[in-house]
Structures are given as C-alpha cells and as structure tokens.
C-alpha cells in the first residue's frame, strides 16, 4: 500500500509541474503544439512503426528537456535575481539542452523523409 500511496503522490507532483510549466512558460506551450503537429504528421504519413515511435519519443524528450530547463531557470531565479555569470551559464546550458533535443528531432525527421 505504501508503494501505491507514493505512486499517487508522484503522479500528483508531476501533474502539478506540468500545469505550472504550461501556465508560466510560452516556450513549453509552443513545444507542446509543435509536438501535436509532429505526431499528427507521423500518423498521417506512411511511416513504419519504428519511424513513428522515434518521432514520437524524440518529441516527448524535447518536452522533458523544456521541463528540466524550466526547473533550472526557476531554481536559479529563486536563489538570486542578481546577474551572475554562473547563473547565466546554467540557464544557457538548460536552453542548449532543449535546442539539442529539438535538433535531434529535426534530424530524425530529415533522415526519415529523405530516406
């Protein structure tokens, strides 16, 4: 029973994080819409199940990267609002992580489309 109680709490906390990020981050909402378009295309096109799974999984990873980037930004802002080169580096690295995940998704689409 303890396992189920803790699982329920983890689901609640995860949902709270999703909702808070949706409400506060324009970039997260943009990635969600981009993923919906990408998923629709992946199901509308004659792709193999493996290709479709790759596209969908990479899109979800972009969302995960954006959630982690938001967590980094919020934690840095909580600690201090002063300009600091380390804070900038942390925020820029989080943003770069999102960009790398998005590039990976784009590369997968290109390879699938070009063959």
Image (spheres, grey):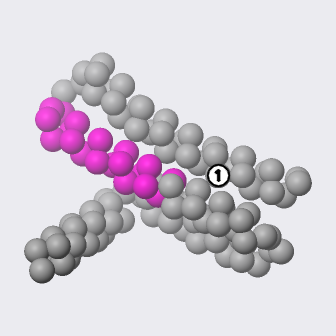
| Residue at the image point whose x is 56% and y is 40% from the top | 100
Q: Where is residue 23? Give x, y as percent.
A: 32, 66
Answer whether residue 101 is visible to the viewer in this image.
Answer: yes
**Which residue range is magenta in the image?**
62-81
User: Callout 1: few (<14), some (14-19), or many (20+) C-alpha neighbours within 10 Å?
Assistant: many
Which residue is at 32% across, 60% downward?
21
Residue 80: image quadrant is top left
In this rendering, does residue 38 appear at all? no
- Left or right? Give the position of 26 relative to 49: left
In the rendered view, would you say 65 is above or below 5? above
User: In terms of depth relative to the viewer, which is nearer, 22 or 111?
Assistant: 111
Q: Residue furthest right?
A: 115
Farthest residue, direction left:
2
- Is residue 12 one of those drawn in magenta? no
Please name whichever residue, 23 or 102, is drawn nearer the observer in this view of the structure.
Answer: 102
**Residue 28, position in %: x, y?**
43, 58
- On the rendered structure, is 92 left or right of 42? left
Question: Where, quadrant-wise, is the N terminus in this rendering?
Answer: bottom left
As drawn, the residue found furthest toward the top would be 85
Secondary structure beneath label 1: helix
Q: Main secondary structure of the magenta part?
A: helix
Q: Residue at x 15, y 41 (%)?
A: 78
Pointer 1: what residue? 105
63 or 25: nearer the viewer: 63
- The percent position of residue 58, horizontal first and vertical second, equals 58, 56
Residue 86 in the image: x percent, y percent?
A: 28, 22
Total marks shown come to 1
Magenta span includes 80: yes
Residue plotted at (80% across, 57% down): 112
In the rendered view, tell whether residue 112 sits above or below residue 32.
Answer: above
Is the C terminus in the top left, top right, bottom left or bottom right quadrant? bottom right
Compared to residue 16, the image places residue 82 above or below, namely above
């Amino acid at each position: 029973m303890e396992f189920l109680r803790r699982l329920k709490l983890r689901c609640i906390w995860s949902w709270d994080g999703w909702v808070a990020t949706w409400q506060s981050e324009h970039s997260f909402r943009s990635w969600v819409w981009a993923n919906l378009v990408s998923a629709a295309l992946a199901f509308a096109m004659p792709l193999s199940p493996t290709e479709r799974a790759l596209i969908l999984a990479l899109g979800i990873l972009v969302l995960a990267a954006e959630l982690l980037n938001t967590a980094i930004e919020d934690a840095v802002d909580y600690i201090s609002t002063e300009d600091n080169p380390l804070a900038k580096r942390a925020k820029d690295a989080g943003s770069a992580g999102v960009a790398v995940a998005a590039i990976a998704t784009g590369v997968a689409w290109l390879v699938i489309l070009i063959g």
